[in-house]
Image: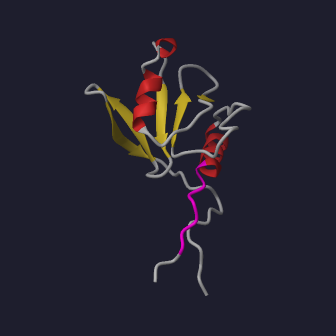
Amino acid sequence: MPRPRLRTPYRQRILAYCEKNGVVVPRNFDISKSSDRLAVIDITGQPLRLVPRTTFLEKEVLQFLARPENAGKRFAILDFRRCCELEYHPSGKLVRGSTFPCKAEGELLNLAVP
């Protein structure tokens, strides 16, 4: 019988990553919902800034990158489920890039069944 799995704590992972890497988290970060696996960080200036919304759809990330107000800005797209960075490919898709440690300290992913 498979063990029950807890929901992956993406918000916890994202906040831990931001704290470790000096990324500023906006006050209204995912205030109306729980966080999803894809997070975008504005790396254009210093300090680095987390975009306030996360998503689980790559299509939404591509739409965000295509907005006129984001022209000329650089972004890091992080997948907190697969623990990898996603890179924008000229074909209009996101491709898997380098990996990074994304698990939060003390993260519990499996529920033990006695």
Q: In this view, does 20 lie to the left or right of 63?
A: right
| Quarter location, residue 50 | top right
Residue 7 magenta: yes
Q: Position of residue 12 (x, y in %)?
A: 65, 51
- The outermost residue toward the right is 27
Q: Is residue 72 visible?
A: no
Q: Residue at x 53, y 25 (%)?
A: 43
Q: In this view, does 77 lie to the left or right of 10?
A: left
Residue 87 to residue 16: above or below: above
Instruction: Out of 15 and 10, give the one closest to the viewer.
Output: 10
Q: Position of residue 72 (x, y in %)?
A: 46, 13
Residue range of the region highlighted in magenta in the rendering: 4-10
Q: Which residue is drawn at 55% across and 31% down?
A: 41
Instruction: Out of 48 and 65, give the one closest to the viewer.
Output: 65
| Quarter location, residue 98 | top left
Residue 73 to residue 53: above or below: above
Q: In this view, does 93 lie to the left or right of 81?
A: left
Q: Which residue is drawn at 47% across and 22% down?
A: 74
Residue 29 to residue 109: above or below: above
Q: Could you tell me what secondary structure mostly forms the magenta stretch? A: loop
Q: Is residue 71 visible?
A: yes
